Image (spheres, grey):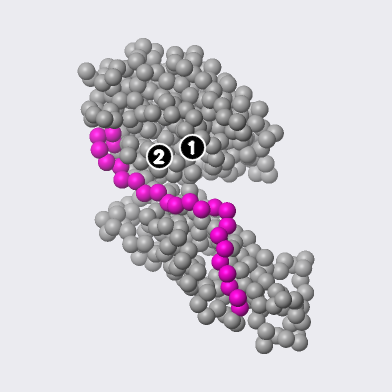
Amino acid sequence: MSSPSSDAVAALADSRFQQTVERLSGYLTYPAISCDSAHFDDVRALAAKIRDDLEALGMDRARVCELPDALPMVAAEWLHAGADKPTVLIYGHLDLQPVKGEPWVTDPHVAVEQDGRLYARGSADDMGGWVSHLAAVQAWLEVHGSLPVNLKLVIEGEEEIGSPNLERFMDAYPDVFASDVMILTDCENPSTELPGLTVSLRGLTEVELVCEALSSDGHSGLWGNMVPDVSTALCALIARLVDADGRPTFGRMEVPADWAEASWKVPLNDAVIHDGAHILPDVKPLPHQGRSPAEWMWRQPALTVVATTLPRPEHKKNALRTRASATLSIRVAPGQTTDELLSELTEIVTTDPPGGVRVTVEREGWDGQGWLYTPKGPAFEAADRAYRKAWGHELVQVGVGGSIPFVAIFGERFGDLPLILNGVMDPKTTAHGPNESMHLGVFRKTIAANVHLYAELGDTPGLIRGD
Ligand SMILES: [Zn+2]
């Protein structure tokens, strides 16, 4: 049976837009900062508020799921569409990044509308994304008293600290996650005119590169020129790892030619990068060297020196040191393993090291593979139809240069399901930074897209697992 019309639902949701912004603004007054124990009560209070609101909305089994030593997760469901309709899971997170020390122009926990954007911590990451679904659900229930699919909602309280307990929640509450299609709403749109579908992430690994030569500091005047300087050797080794532009010379990936060509059309050009990354006016983004910015940022490894033990100004002395080290943060391209990448790196730095210093490479804390997903099948065609209606454009496949632990976890556990990763962020959002904001036009179009998406998924055969 085909779904009732989504047009009337989208019209009602649109007429209620200002109320939806007010609902979102109410949630944004909670400083639900998950990395700071002083705010754990705020996370819990917001979870309780969302649970109550889901119940009031007409969702069943609205509950706060708890585990020892974890911040809560909220879940609810509406499963009355019938066994012939797919079950769609919507994931979001309610917790926030901290704001301490950031130069906010307005109070980060009071939503302010300005120039078509809503400013507040969490406005786009991720409460806006989450509320775009609440608004769609509410409109469906008001217009038709029902939804065109079976729906499960889950909202996590620990995403901003890397979802350390998400797998435990998946084990402890399997029915919360059991579904046929997953919509994960915490990702970015390439522009306010083009809706994004995230299909790849880079992984992240960290190593400590250590140079040693002496058992005790030595006088640089007495010994200089015959005794190796570990600090110089360390800098020379780091320079070996990168080309003249500072990009890694190792682990370079071959991407499919058609992907490489299409990646030039992604609206990720030098101007967007210059602006978005706060590059100084007289400095330019790195040269393309025959590859698109999207390829460099999403599909190739990158290296950043994130810490060193080079002598600091307050410890300056005319001496050759015993040891110098640098922590290298390496973004792992999707499709490559950290083991492969690190064995190449180790080979480069340990072969004939400068001054014959002793070189070791030690793995540090972070270690996560990238993720590469091929969206295909009827769920994505349904999503494209919904987005064309609401945005006038189908979803544009984008990558993320960073690493999002929850996406990797969903990808690993549920990679055989359609995973629709989208959200309400755009290049001006500055998630995790000062003056985070959401574009209200994006919010409005995303609410409409969600309304149509449920209907399109409800009308798409072949989505139910085991069908
Ligand atoms: Zn987020």
Q: Amino acid at mark 1?
A: Glu
Alpha carbons under labels 1 and 2: distance apart: 9 Å
How many numbered markers are drawn? 2
**Secondary structure type for disc 1:** helix
Q: Amino acid at mark 2?
A: Arg
Q: Is residue 80 visible?
A: yes
Front position in the image: 213 or 396? 213
Residue 159 can be seen in this image: no
The answer to whether residue 393 is left or right of residue 301 is left
Q: Is residue 302 left or right of residue 10?
A: right
* Residue on which disc 2 sits: 413
Where does residue 171 sit, x and y in percent of width and height?
47, 33
The disc, 1 or 2, on the residue closer to the chain's N-terminal end is 1
- Residue located at (39% from left, 57% from top): 336
Which quadrant of the rendered structure holds the C terminus?
A: top left
Give the side of residue 424 with respect to residue 380, left or right: right
Q: Which residue is at 48% across, 51% downward?
A: 368
Q: Residue at x 50, y 69 (%)?
A: 346
Q: Are marks 1 and 2 in contact (CB under 8 Å)?
A: yes
Residue 63 lies in the magenta-colored region:
no
- Residue wearing tag 1: 167
Q: Dot 1: within a 10 Å radius of its alpha carbon, few (fewer than 14), some, or many (20 or more) residues?
A: some
Which image quadrant: the N terminus? top left
Residue range highlighted in magenta? 357-380
Q: Nearer the viewer, residue 120 or 369?
A: 369
- In the figure, residue 313 lies in which quadrant? bottom right
Residue 224 place in picture, x, y as percent: 70, 85
Residue 363 point in image, percent of width and height: 55, 60
- Helix, strand, or loop for circle 2? helix
